Image (spheres, rainbow, N blue to C red):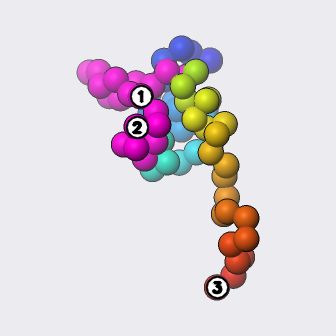
Amino acid sequence: MKAELTVAEAVAASGRSKTTVYRWIADGLLKATDTSEGLIVRSVDLMRVAGRHRRGRPRGTPKYR
């Protein structure tokens, strides 16, 4: 894996949605650098943040409404 990833590459590497990756950046959980190619994130930081945030609905949340 490359040391620095574009948002599209970060989405593919983490298996999360583009919305989630942008939310992590906006919330300050994932540091991004703006370049001429777009936002760049460090792969080490991405894996750290992705590992801390579980996927799916929270425990105790009803499956159906």
Q: Which residue is mark 2?
A: 28
Please report the residue visible at 67 percent of the width from the left and 62 percent of the height from the top: 58
Q: Name, please, the residue furthest toward the left.
A: 36
Spatial separation of the CA atoms under disc 1 and disc 2: 6 Å
Residue 64 position within the rendered picture, expressed as x and y whole percent measured from the top left = 69, 82
Spatial separation of the CA atoms under disc 3 and disc 1: 36 Å
Q: Name, please, the residue furthest toward the top.
A: 3
Q: Is residue 50 left or right of residue 42?
A: right
* On screen, residue 62 above or below 57: below
Q: Tell me the crowding category of disc 2: few under 14, some 14 to 19, or many 20 or more residues within 10 angstroms, Cα based.
A: few
State the quadrant of the N terminus.
top right
Indicate the secondary structure of the residue bearing disc 2: loop
Q: Do the residues under discs 1 and 2 have CB atoms within 8 angstroms? A: yes
What is the span of residues highlighted in magenta in the rendered image?
A: 23-43
Q: Which residue is mark 1?
A: 31
Please report the residue visible at 40 percent of the width from the left and 37 percent of the height from the top: 28
Q: Amino acid at mark 3?
A: Arg
* On screen, residue 15 above or below 39: below
* Quadrant in the rendering for residue 27: top left
Indicate the secondary structure of the residue bearing disc 3: loop
* Quadrant in the rendering for residue 53: top right
Q: Which residue is mark 3?
A: 65
Residue 12 position within the rendered picture, expressed as x and y whole percent measured from the top left = 58, 36
